[in-house]
Image: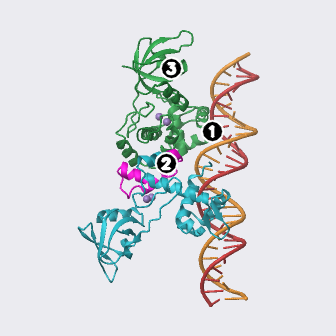
Chain colours: A green, B cyan, C red, D orange
DNA sequence: AAAAAAATTTAGACAAACCTAAAAATATAT
DNA sequence: ATATATTTTTAGGTTTGTCTAAATTTTTTT
């Protein structure tokens, strides 16, 4: 098996993220934006990845992952999320502190390591942010969560994940006492600013701004 | 704090290893040999490391680590050995399987990560090969072990570590049933080939070749 | 359908870490 | 003390992943 570089893996992961589940074409500029590089650099890399058979690329047409590229991307994502579980569950990091470290750990190349880590963690299905962890074969769950903004007054939902992974957002949730698994009941929605009054675990009530609601993934129970 | 590259860290670690505890000058060729590069490449890197104040370098005179360089090297060694403990103790790897993976993990840059890992492992003082783990301040124990070749007939010693870290050697020890902590009693030494008859934990006796004796670190009890 | 704007690619460079071949310095042998 | 051998450095290139500026293609507007 040929080794992909750190950088190549990051491009594949980014293409996967921007491509969405429908596998839509990703533009050069979108990739430049996401990878904090210039469009010209992206073009260079796309040529190389196409050469290696990891992406489908036709000049000016955007890119999608090939089957092989998808496999590689999902394996990197698997490692990222497993390491995040390790950092939170075993080392006691906060969910707001683990992304950057996992960003490095995800490139450690050893299949045995990943499988042993997975077993050590008890084969977790979700990472600390509620994102599903692909299995060793590259199967990725697609839990159909909805946003808190889509929930009607009176409904009770489970907090299942976040759209925004920024540590500032996660820390805000910590201060609000909203964690994965919290039961949220929408008691009222303000007409003017769409902020919601939400009861948490049948206890405290809390005002949740639209900005926050838009980034909370929840599930009906 | 300025970041050193993966490669720079490996050079510093190698200089530390070749420099020994006396901090003797390391030659360009020795570094080329150890890093599997050419002397010309080593010279390039030495210039850069000297520029950064990590080594003392005068053309043609060999190199030593500066205080700062030593700190960096010891921190990399600390991370390497802690990760090896993790891989063996927590993930169930054999001591013959962990070196290459730790070689990658040792470059993950996060002081908090190292300290949390250290705590999670219970502040181990030695790695799976018996090598002492530097503390957070860069203090490194210097246990004065001796080689099994220096032990007289009739003496009982504790197996404390290995000089050779090659997996082939470690696997040979596994097959012989010699592990860290084994009590070894030298019962006889063959005049001709210096092979030893050794009793392990007061049980089985075993023939140990000179090649093996030369690589076993032991301690009088 | 042409013009203007936006997106993308090409051309030409650069830094990091490596290489080979040649030159220079140091060490060893006569 | 010279000659020879060894070690180390310099000179000039290569590859990877990046950059800016210019050229080209595609998209949008008029
Ligand atoms: Mn993450
Ligand atoms: Mn995550
Ligand atoms: Mn090791
Ligand atoms: Mn070790």
Q: Which mark is residue A213?
A: 3
Instruction: From the image, state whether disc 3 or disc 1 is nearer to you.
Output: 3
- Chain ID of residue with mark 2: B
Question: Magenta stretch?
Answer: B84-112
Q: Which mark is residue B114?
A: 2
Q: CA distance from mark 3 to mark 1?
A: 31 Å
Q: Which mark is residue B216?
A: none
Quarter of the image for residue A82 reads top left
Residue at 67%, 67% (x, y): give it: B58
**Secondary structure beneath label 3:** helix
Is there CB contact under 8 Å for labels 3 and 2? no
Quarter of the image for residue A68 reads top left
Indicate the position of residue A76 as horizontal and vertical percent values: 46, 41
A145 or D30, nearer to the observer? A145
B39 is within the stretch colored magenta:
no
The residue singled out by tag 1 in the image is: A37
Q: Is residue A141 above or below residue D4?
A: above
Q: Determine if residue A107 is in view.
A: no
Indicate the position of residue B175 as horizontal and vertical percent values: 29, 63
- Chain ID of residue with mark 3: A
**Secondary structure beneath label 2:** helix
- Chain ID of residue with mark 1: A
**Secondary structure beneath label 1:** loop
First along the sequence among labels 3 and 1 = 1
Q: CA distance from mark 2 to mark 1?
A: 30 Å
Determine the quadrant in which ligand 3 lies: bottom left
Q: Is residue A183 above or below residue A14?
A: above
Q: Is residue A220 above or below residue A85?
A: above
């Amino acid at each position: 098996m040929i080794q992909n570089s750190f950088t190549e893996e990051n491009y594949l992961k980014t293409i996967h993220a921007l491509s969405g589940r429908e596998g839509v074409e990703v533009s050069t500029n979108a990739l430049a934006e996401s990878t904090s590089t210039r469009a010209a650099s992206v073009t260079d890399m796309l040529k190389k990845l196409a050469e290696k058979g990891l992406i489908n690329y036709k000049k000016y047409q955007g890119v999608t992952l090939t089957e092989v590229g998808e496999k590689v991307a999902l394996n990197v994502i698997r490692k990222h999320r497993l390491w995040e579980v390790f950092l939170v569950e075993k080392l006691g990091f906060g969910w707001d502190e683990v992304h950057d470290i996992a960003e490095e750990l995800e490139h450690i190349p050893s299949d045995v390591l990943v499988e042993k880590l997975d077993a050590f963690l008890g084969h977790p299905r979700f990472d600390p942010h509620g994102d599903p962890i692909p299995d060793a074969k590259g199967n990725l769950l697609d839990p159909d969560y909805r946003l808190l903004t889509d929930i009607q007054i009176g409904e009770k939902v489970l907090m299942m994940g976040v759209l925004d992974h920024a540590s500032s957002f996660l820390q805000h949730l910590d201060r609000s006492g909203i964690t994965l698994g919290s039961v949220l009941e929408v008691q009222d929605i303000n007409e003017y600013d769409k902020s919601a009054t939400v009861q948490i675990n049948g206890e405290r009530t809390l005002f949740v701004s639209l900005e926050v609601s838009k980034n909370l993934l929840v599930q009906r129970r």
